[in-house]
Image (tube, rainbow, N blue to C red):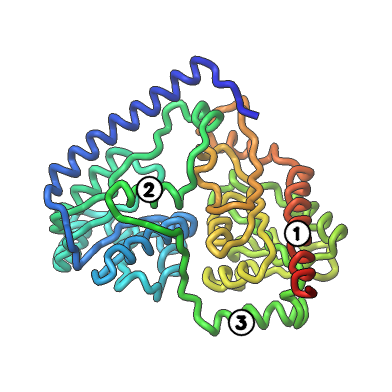
Amino acid sequence: MNQRVPFIKKLQLLMVGLWIKWLNFWILFFQKLFFCQKASNPQNILIYKIGNIGDIVCAVPSFIAIRRFYPNAKITILTSPGVKSAPGARELLTGAWYFNEMKIYYADEIDSLSKKINFIKDLRGNNYDLFIQIPDDLANFKTLFRNMIFAKFIGVKSAFGFKIRTIQLFKKTQVDYLFKKNEVENLIEILKENEVDCKNIEFSFNIDVNKKIKIDNILTKNFGLDYKKKLIIAISPAGKREANKWPIERYKELVAYIKKKYGVKFVVIGGQTEFTDAEIIKSGISNGILNLAGELDLLENLELLKRCSFLVSNDTGTAHMAAAVGLSVVGIYGVRNVFGSWFPYGKNHKILYHKFIDCDYQREECIKKSVELITFNEAARACDDIIEELNKNYHGLQRKILR
């Protein structure tokens, strides 16, 4: 049922749209001013994309589209997860076929003027002829203008991809009344606007055979040789921000409910910081649940997700990893972003959220409140629906085989 938009809200949304267009007018003006040459056949391309797990996973189809459009070029990705302890492209994309080289830097490596100068000098020596910005969803005018100056300083003659997509003006109105394409589609759209064709959305990760054997051995040991015939539900209670986390007691209640009703298997995944939460979820269940928090690297987690039936997750990078391997997600989302913009890519997901909340959407306590409004019953219904569909498809497949 469509929500009627009050006149004042329509006016606010109009102002948001006009302001974004105005900012992008000037972004495009400076892009054309600084990079007046168009690279018709670039041979040495630098892609600039920063971010952590979710940001990088959502950008993979764009990376592949660039590779397919420039099949003979040397392509380097320049990226940073921020601090050294944060996971990102190194953990996900090492050995990926669509890059020739990966350059990773951290915040403390460019935290002084002298370090910045040396950083630029090192890059300038590579003689890149095309710079492609894969912009962050929240990148503002100042950041994108700075990145254009950076691209100019390293000596590129051609660059594109600078675009403002989100502003915080009237955030509550935007979240309550707008629904945007997800991040994967938004980034592909930016490439298309710059004449980089993309016929298909593709994900690809370099998961070696040893990682695949490791995951197979773990699941066989804990769930039996026939684990592939069983429903295995992955649980991700992690969250980059505390406000994104659904209460751990509800995860425990949800797992107990599904376990009792369907007798399925569970794996709880995440980093070492989620180990205690995973033990809480696991407590009271005698068998059929596996705590793998902190036990696997990112590519092993990806391989594990391939073997699962669906994922229940907070708004975190794991949801995007699951979507990248074609897994359905029961996603628990708050009012942090405009709805749709950070939903997992693809269909058959069940996204739970509440909006029209009486609080300031830019405050963490409000975002936390919106997440906590999602009830156990809502999550249980979403899981029931997916399990019912999985069972229907499984029995339908059996019938086809018997014929």
- Which numbered marker is on residue 214? 3
User: Which mark is first along the chain, 3 or 2?
Assistant: 2
Task: Determine crowd level at label 2: few under 14, some 14-19, many 20+ residues with C-alpha closer than 10 A.
Answer: some
229 vs 388: above or below: below
Q: Residue furthest front?
A: 403
> Is label 2 in a helix, a strand or a loop?
helix
> Is label 3 in a helix, a strand or a loop?
helix
Left or right position of 8 against 243: left
148 vs 74: above or below: above
Residue 82 falls in image quadrant = bottom left
The N terminus - image quarter: top right
> Which amino acid, by three-letter code, is at mark 3?
Lys
Q: Give the percent coordinates (x, y) of residue 389.
A: 74, 56
Q: Nearer the viewer, mark 2 or mark 3?
A: 2
Left or right position of 165 against 248: left
Q: Give the percent coordinates (x, y) of residue 108.
A: 32, 59
Q: Nearer the viewer, mark 1 or mark 2?
A: 2
Task: Determine crowd level at label 3: few under 14, some 14-19, many 20+ residues with C-alpha closer than 10 A.
Answer: some
For label 1, the residue is 281
> Is label 1 in a helix, a strand or a loop?
helix
Q: Residue at x 70, y 62 (%)?
A: 278
CB-based contact (under 8 Å), mark 2 and mark 3: no
For label 2, the residue is 189
The C terminus - image quarter: bottom right
Residue 98 falls in image quadrant = bottom left
Q: Residue furthest right?
A: 260
Q: Residue at x 68, y 79 (%)?
A: 218
CB-based contact (under 8 Å), mark 1 and mark 3: no
- Spatial separation of the CA atoms under disc 1 and disc 3: 24 Å
Task: Determine crowd level at label 1: few under 14, some 14-19, many 20+ residues with C-alpha closer than 10 A.
Answer: many
> Which amino acid, by three-letter code, is at mark 2?
Glu
Q: Residue at x 20, y 67 (%)?
A: 44
